Amino acid sequence: MAFQGTLVIDTEKCKGCGVCVETCPNKVIALSKKVNKKGYNYLEMVKEEACIGCANCAVICPDGVIEVYRAKY
């Protein structure tokens, strides 16, 4: 059974620390070239189809700006 994940990221609260990027096993996320209102490069999904919903990114995020949803298919 396989899983497909998706992320909801609060881009305005993300400080762009990049800790989550390093923990993603499938390199699904990266820091955007765009900035939020505070001037930080925020997190974005770059390979949505590769997300398995492992939630490593959400667990390690120091600011709790990532929500992970996971579905069986």
Image (cartoon, helix red, strand yellow):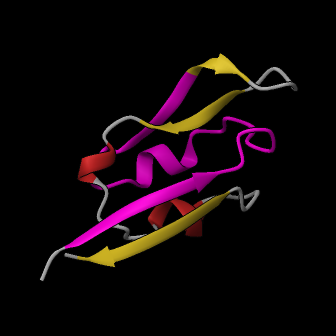
From the viewer's perspective, is residue 70 above or below residue 26? below
In the rendered view of the protein, which quadrant contains the C terminus?
A: bottom left
5 left or right, relative to 7: left
- Left or right for 49, reference 69: left
Q: Farthest bottom residue? A: 1
Q: Residue 65 location in percent, x, y?
A: 70, 56
Give residue 32's position: percent from left, percent from top.
55, 25
Q: Residue furthest top?
A: 33
Q: Using the image as rendered, state which of residue 59 and residue 47 is in the foreground.
A: 47
Res. 62 image quadrant: bottom right
* Along the line of sight, the residue nearer the viewer: 57 or 36: 36
Q: Is residue 29 magenta?
A: yes
Q: Residue at x 46, y 34 (%)?
A: 30
Quadrant where the N terminus is found in the figure: bottom left
The total number of labels drawn is 0
Instruction: Please tell me in which quadrant of the rendered image residue 34 appears.
Output: top right
Extent of the magenta region: 3-32
- Quarter of the rendering containing residue 43: top right
- The extreme front residue here reads 73
Above-or-below relation of 68 to 25? below
Q: Answer above or below: position of 55 versus 24.
A: below
Q: Report the residue that reaches farthest toward the right.
A: 38
- Residue 54 image position (x, y, % from top left): 37, 70
Rendered position, 32 above or below 46: above
Residue 45 vs residue 1: left or right?
Answer: right
Q: In the shown orientation, is residue 25 left or right of residue 66?
A: left
Q: Residue at x 29, y 65 (%)?
A: 52
Q: Residue at x 50, y 56 (%)?
A: 7
For the point 65% across and 32% down, the residue is 42
